[in-house]
Amino acid sequence: MPQFQTIEQAFEWFLENVYPGLSSEDKHILRNAKYAFYKEDLKVSTKRMMRVMNEYADFEIFYDIKSSKK
């Protein structure tokens, strides 16, 4: 599974790699989110991107912390 630094990068990968394989019905449901993501003056909320990826893909969130003190 690919790893990304931001939700936006993950969503872009989802749109390029998962979205094309979805059924026509699912694509119809997600069309507005895809349009808003690529349109400069529109925005898709992080919450909406995460909801879409959770519903149509195996999406996991994890955090990595490294101590700044040595």
Image (cartoon, rainbow, N blue to C red):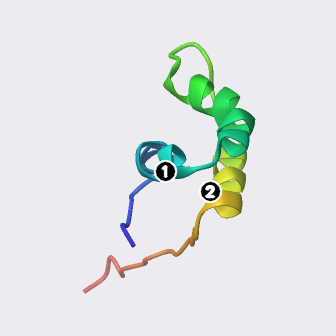
The image position of residue 14, as x and y in percent, is 49, 50
Local crowd size for mark 2, using a 10 Å CA cut-off: few (<14), some (14–19), many (≥20): some
Which one is earlier in the sequence, the residue at label 1 or at label 2? 1
Q: Which residue is drawn at 65% across and 39% down?
A: 27
Q: Residue at x 42, y 50 (%)?
A: 17
Relative depth, front residue between 7 and 38: 38
Horizontally, residue 9 falls left or right of residue 37, namely left
Q: Quadrant of the C terminus?
A: bottom left
Q: Compared with residue 18, is residue 61 higher up or lower down, i.e. above or below?
A: below
The image position of residue 15, as x and y in percent, is 49, 43
Relative depth, front residue between 61 and 27: 27
Q: Are marks 1 and 2 in contact (CB under 8 Å)?
A: yes
Q: Residue furthest top?
A: 41
The image position of residue 23, as x and y in percent, is 64, 47
Local crowd size for mark 1, using a 10 Å CA cut-off: few (<14), some (14–19), many (≥20): some
Relative depth, front residue between 20 and 67: 20
Q: Which residue is drawn at 65% across and 59% down?
A: 56
Horizontally, residue 30 falls left or right of residue 12, namely right
Label 2's element?
helix
- Name the kind of residue labelled 1 in the image: Phe
Q: Name the residue under label 2.
A: 53
Q: Compared with residue 58, is residue 25 higher up or lower down, i.e. above or below?
A: above
Q: Quadrant of the N terminus?
A: bottom left
Query: Mark 1 and mark 2: span between their CA atoms?
Result: 7 Å
Residue 14 is tagged as 1
Q: Compared with residue 28, is residue 14 higher up or lower down, i.e. above or below?
A: below
